[in-house]
Image (tube, grey):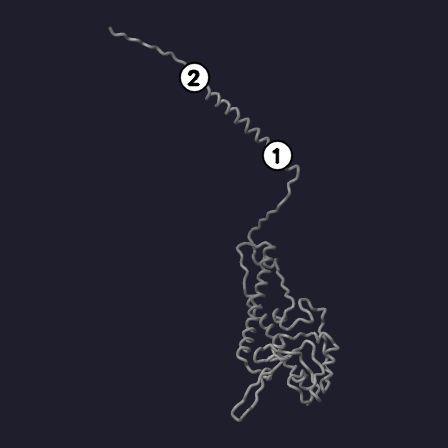
Amino acid sequence: YFTNARGTATLNGDDFRASGSFIFQALNTFCQLSNQTIANRLIQFYSSQYVTVSVTPLQVFQSQTQAFVSQFISLMTNDFLLSISTIRKTTQSNSLLSGQFTNYYLVRQSSNYVNSVFVLYNNCSCASSATCAYKFPIYDSKNSKVIFTVPGIYTGCYIIEALLQSNLQCFYNKTCINQVQSYFTKYLSMNLTTLDSSLLIGFSMNSTIQELVDELMVEEWNSSTIYDGYYNECQPSKCSYSYQTKNDAIYIITTLTGLVGGLITVLKLTVPRLIKMMRRKKEIIKPQIGKTTFRIKVDV
């Protein structure tokens, strides 16, 4: 659409009509990478087995499966972001030349020498930062003055870096879309449907592409656990259960009566015997009174 609608007019390199298509190509690539990553990880996740020695109670089963799903999403997202971060840092640290010459352009100074010159975006140099960017302009073809800037869409040193700073707010507004289309030389009718803000759950119209990518471009995860399927697959040979009840007044009175009756019976059996034993012990320990005889012998 961009190529056919802009006509043959000579446009600045950073004009939205000239290079805006690369933003949407990069966005489409992120969508495909996200879908492919999720599909591959789901294959691995579905191949895993849940093994237990005995049947897991329903509440424990639900909490465990929810923990498995949360861990699955977290690990998958971290791996996805790590790979993107590695590519971005490698590109930035080596100052790789953009294919669209958005960060450097080449100047031929002699037949044997070509010099690279960095590009500035709002006084931000691509030689010092890869995230330099400003809103995508549309220029007047007559005097190269900016006549419109596309809301939420940025251009910068690298297409990826500019895209991650962008948002899709313009595409929730039919007026904004029509205004952008009006600046194309050959206005081509295109059946565009505005994005529906009422469908947003975790994101907003101003959410940046970086925020979307950080969530794997998934707004909401829907997971379900089927306990009946797990129970039928487990096929337990026996089942036991326990329940808690609150004792009523009759049960309490009956229990206390039984305890008192049992205590009386025990006392009847033990107290008489203890008394007899104590009496016998007293009779044995009575003091004995004896007589003492003295003999005196006198020798003459």
Tell me the SS state at disc 2: loop
Q: Nearer the viewer, residue 299 or 273?
A: 299
Residue 163 visible in rendering: yes
Q: Residue furthest right?
A: 175
| Residue position for label 2 | 287
The image quarter in which residue 130 lies: bottom right
The image quarter in which residue 86 lies: bottom right
Using the image, determine if residue 117 lies above or below residue 274. Answer: below
Q: Position of residue 40 (x, y in %)?
A: 56, 71
Q: Position of residue 113 (x, y in %)?
A: 52, 90
Q: Position of residue 250 (x, y in %)?
A: 66, 37
| Residue position for label 1 | 256
- The disc placed on residue 274 is none
Q: Residue furthest bottom?
A: 111
Q: Amino acid at mark 1?
A: Leu
Q: Nearer the viewer, mark 1 or mark 2?
A: 2
Decide: few, some or many residues near mark 1? Use Cα within 10 Å; few <14, some 14-19, many ≥20.
few
Residue 232 visible in rendering: no
